[in-house]
Every structure is written in structure tokens, then in C-alpha cells.
């Protein structure tokens, strides 16, 4: 679904309200609900909440109230309390949808107040994100999340860690921060992949070489070789990356690319992809070190290990294929 259609389906330019439950009360946020409906939403939502500064562009606090008895504020017998009702009706103007963390809350609020609610996997990614930076968004909240809540996992974050061969429950702050860097590297590479697509088409038209299954780094390397023949390739051995026939074709056809490529842009993309790969290497190694450190902690203090979010020792890193 495109951003335009997503916004239209939600109404109010795609802005929705979020009822967020803290240990001591409830908060109301507005949120860019379009992100719930975009392709790959489950892979991307978590990254908006990796750090407070990242969340500023997608979520905005409206109100927070302490509730002495949260179970009385919303339950299937009495419905929604007067205080919570006033809070919800204040911010959920006609036409606004409300994201909630429990299907039970969805049923009660829709029946009691007539506010249309959302509760699905994408919404739960938002709730995970709000919990991750709860004390930044709701500084009045001094209590900590329960153990059960701390052990909840973002599906999107888990997807990213799986891609890098990291098998760990990463509710610890340092893991999330490192994962955000890897996410940004992947995102920037995707942007460059779209730019490289045109260069790949030229490569196919001029030399008859189809780069369809090549990685962005391999394609960027090929474009650099035809734009700047004879210049050094910083990462990787071209003889290992390309067959002898392809290398010969690059050399013989280099002159045919004159005036067809934006050489400076190809070089810029190549250098930036190199930078992303270097950052990835460093951050993945830091993730490995973090897990090894946690394994050592396990030997002396099981409770400390649990605070890392780790299960008993096992081989958690798999070779990335």
C-alpha cells in the first residue's frame, strides 16, 4: 500500500492516537499511522524507536496521567472509567483511530466509547518502541517495566539480528543501539541500489552482462571499473568477484561507456557503500563481543545474565551466509 492510500484509509492525514500503558498510568500519543500500513512495516517500525531522537519524527506525546488502580480504569465489567474516558475523548476526535496494546482494550473501548481501535502485530511494534524509550517520553514514570514486558521482543529487530547471524534476546540498550546503526547501513544501501539500477541497465545494454543477481557492492565495483578503468579496487579481488570473461569484457568495453555514465556519481556510491561495509564489520564485531561478555557473566551470575536478556550459554552466532 502506498503512503497516499494508507493515509486515506486511516483518515486525518494518516495520524492516529496511541493509548500507551505504563507501570503507573496511561499516556496518549499521536503517531504517524501510515507506517503501520507500508510494505515491510514489520521490518521498519522498531527502528523509529531505537533512540529518542529517532522517535521525534513519528510520535508526539499528548498527555500522561497516573492511575492508582489501572485495573479499574478499563475492564470488561465496568468498561472505561470516567477519568480515562475523559482523557480518551479529549484526544480522540471524531474520525481518529486509536492503537491499543490488547485486544481486550480494543473490545472495551469500541463498545464503551465508540472509538475505532487498532491492535495487530504492527501496533505491537509501536508499543515495543514506546516501552524502549518510555522514561524519555514519560519522565514522570519512575517505575520500571515488569520482567515479562522487558523480555518482549520486537519482531523487526529480531529479523535484522537474524540477517546478521545474531541469536540473542536484545532488550539491552547497547544491542538496540548497534542494531540501529546496522539498520541505517542497510537502508542507505537500499537507496543506492535504486540508483545503481540504471547503471546496471547500461552495463547490460553495452556489454551484454546481466547484473540482476549481484549485490549492490558488486555492481558498484563493476561500474567503477568501467568508469575508471585501471584504478584500484579498495575492497575485494576483482578476479574473485567476476569471471575472466566478464573482466575481459570490462576492459574491452570501457571506452564504450564514455558519455553514458555519470562517473562522479558512480564513484560516490562506490565509496559510500565501502563506508557502510566498514561500519557493518565494526558493529557486528561489537555485537559478538557483547554476547561473549554476557556469556562470561553467566558463569558467575545467572541473574546478571538475565538482565542482558540471554538464555543459558549456547552457540548464538552463526556464520553469515
Image (spheres, rainbow, N blue to C red):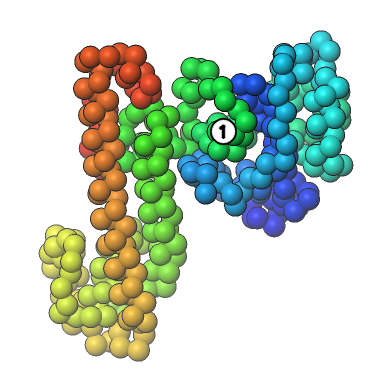
Q: Horizontal and vertical percent for residue 81?
A: 83, 19
Kindly tell me whether residue 272 is visible in this rendering.
yes
- Give left or right: position of 159 versus 284: right
Q: Horizontal and vertical percent for residue 257?
A: 30, 84
Q: Horizontal and vertical percent for residue 179?
A: 38, 42
- Give left or right: position of 95 versus 28: right
**Residue at which label 1 appears:** 134
Considering every residue shown, the one lying at the far top of the view is: 77
Q: Horizontal and vertical percent for residue 196?
A: 38, 68
Q: In terms of secondary structure, where does tag 1 sit?
A: helix
Kindly tell me whether residue 37 is visible in this rendering.
no
Examine the rendered structure and indicate whether residue 306 appears above or below residue 133.
Answer: above
* Residue closest to the eye, 240 or 176: 176
Callout 1: few (<14), some (14-19), or many (20+) C-alpha neighbours within 10 Å? many
* Residue closest to the eye, 102 or 42: 102
* Residue closest to the eye, 138 or 179: 138
Quarter of the rendering occupied by the C terminus? top left
- Give left or right: position of 55 versus 192: right
Examine the rendered structure and indicate whether residue 161 appears above or below residue 201.
Answer: above
Residue at x 36%, y 85% (from the top left corner): 260
Quarter of image, res 245: bottom left
Examine the rendered structure and indicate whether residue 131 appears above or below residue 71.
Answer: below
Residue at x 40%, y 30% (from the top left corner): 172
Amino acid at each position: 500500500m502506498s503512503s497516499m492510500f494508507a493515509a486515506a484509509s486511516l483518515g486525518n492525514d494518516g495520524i492516529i492516537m496511541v493509548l500507551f500503558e505504563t507501570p503507573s498510568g496511561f499516556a496518549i500519543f499521536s503517531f504517524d499511522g501510515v507506517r503501520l500500513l507500508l510494505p515491510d512495516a514489520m521490518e521498519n517500525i522498531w527502528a523509529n524507536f531505537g533512540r529518542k531522537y529517532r522517535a521525534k519524527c513519528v510520535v508526539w506525546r499528548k498527555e500522561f496521567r497516573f492511575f492508582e488502580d489501572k485495573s479499574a480504569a478499563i475492564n470488561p465489567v465496568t468498561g472505561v472509567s470516567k477519568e480515562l474516558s475523559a482523557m480518551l475523548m479529549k484526544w480522540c476526535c471524531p474520525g481518529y483511530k486509536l492503537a491499543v496494546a490488547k485486544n481486550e482494550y480494543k473490545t472495551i473501548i469500541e463498545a464503551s466509547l465508540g472509538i475505532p481501535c487498532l491492535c495487530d502485530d504492527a501496533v505491537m511494534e509501536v508499543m515495543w518502541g514506546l516501552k524502549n524509550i518510555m522514561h524519555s517520553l514519560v519522565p514522570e514514570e519512575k517505575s520500571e517495566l515488569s520482567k515479562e514486558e522487558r523480555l518482549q521482543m520486537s519482531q523487526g529487530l529480531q529479523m535484522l539480528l537474524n540477517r546478521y547471524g545474531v541469536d540473542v534476546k536484545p532488550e539491552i540498550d547497547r544491542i538496540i543501539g548497534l542494531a540501529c546503526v546496522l539498520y541505517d547501513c542497510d537502508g542507505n544501501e537500499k537507496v543506492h541500489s535504486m540508483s545503481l539500477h540504471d547503471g546496471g541497465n547500461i552495463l547490460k545494454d553495452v556489454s551484454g552482462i546481466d547484473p540482476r543477481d549481484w549485490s549492490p557492492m558488486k555492481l558498484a565495483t563493476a561500474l567503477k571499473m568501467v568508469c575508471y578503468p585501471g584504478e584500484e579496487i579498495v575492497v575485494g579481488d576483482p578476479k574473485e568477484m567476476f569471471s575472466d570473461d566478464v573482466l575481459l569484457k570490462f576492459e574491452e568495453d570501457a571506452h564504450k561507456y564514455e558519455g553514458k555514465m555519470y562517473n562522479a556519481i558512480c564513484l560516490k556510491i562506490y565509496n559510500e557503500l565501502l563506508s557502510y561495509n566498514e561500519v557493518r564489520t565494526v558493529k557486528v564485531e561489537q555485537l559478538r563481543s557483547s554476547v561473549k561478555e554476557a556469556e562470561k557473566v553467566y558463569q558467575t551470575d545467572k541473574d546478571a545474565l538475565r538482565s542482558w536478556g540471554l538464555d543459558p550459554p549456547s552457540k548464538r552466532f552463526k556464520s553469515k551466509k
